Amino acid sequence: MDNTITAILTVWKRDHLEEQLLALLGQTLSPQVIWVQQTQHHVNVDSVVSKYRDHIKYICWEDNPGVFGRFESVKDVTTSYVYIIDDDIIPGPGFLEKALETSKRLNAIVCPNGRLLNIRNNQTEVFVGDGYEFQHSFCTVDKEVDFGNNSWFFKKEWIDMFLLESPLFRNNGEDIHLSATCKQYGNIPTFVPRQIKPYESGNIKRVYSTDEFALHKKVGFGWERVRVIKKFRNSGWVLQCEKVI
């Protein structure tokens, strides 16, 4: 299998597109294809799209597909790997190379941050990769998690498992959905890779995630995620804390 990558960026109400494009174009392993998917017209990115028109494929959705739309579009990807990135994430220049190596070595979805869940209440118990020590994603070892956050690097073919299940909510739970379906149907784990320096980190601007557009600040966000987790646990998704040593 070749190492070609399609990166998928989204534009909603944040205005970090040019910084994200520069981060992707400056990678030690650059994506072959970059898709920019804008939902409606909350910010004006016309000048950025024009400036980088030779490097990107741009579309604008008039109807809001929620956070699932970008994952559902992966069925049309023609490269071997996909890198979907939230609109508040800026990867260090070595992250894509690290993500590819880690994904191939562990046969896993790779994310800069992840979560370990509490079996008693189906809520996050441990944050991995995005603790409070640094402004970049940080992890001392490759760590398997229940699901990943913020960006997702994976084999294109794995989206077939994602598409086997319909979402409970269009604007919440896509991160849980990807890890749960891939684990259930293909025994594909999710890992946060070792990230020590900003250069190799999956996110070097964590402050961007604290603005007013953060979905985790939405009323009912946590309750919806508990519903999603329960759905997959009831259909056989085994959490890390449930594994027999």
Image (cartoon, helix red, strand yellow):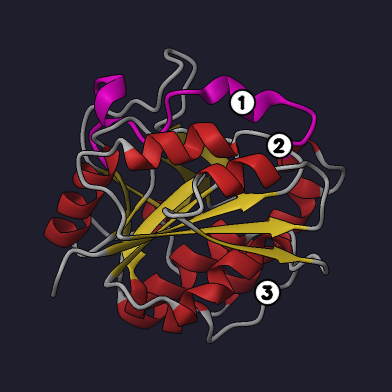
Q: Specify the farthest residue to the right.
A: 219
Q: Residues within 10 Å of mark 3 (few under 14, many from 20)?
A: some
Q: Amino acid at mark 1?
A: Tyr
Alpha-carbon distance for marks 2 and 1? 9 Å
Q: Residue at x 46, y 28 (%)?
A: 130
Q: Earlier in the sequence, mark 1 or mark 3?
A: 3
Name the element at disc 3.
loop
Alpha-carbon distance for marks 1 and 3? 27 Å
Q: Position of residue 127 (x, y in %)?
A: 48, 34
Q: Earlier in the sequence, mark 2 or mark 1?
A: 2
- Asked if 119 appears above or below 238 in the picture, the reply is above
Q: Amino acid at mark 2?
A: Arg
Q: Amino acid at mark 3?
A: Pro
Q: Specify the farthest residue to the top.
A: 133
Q: Earlier in the sequence, mark 3 or mark 2?
A: 2
Frontmost residue, 73 versus 201 = 73
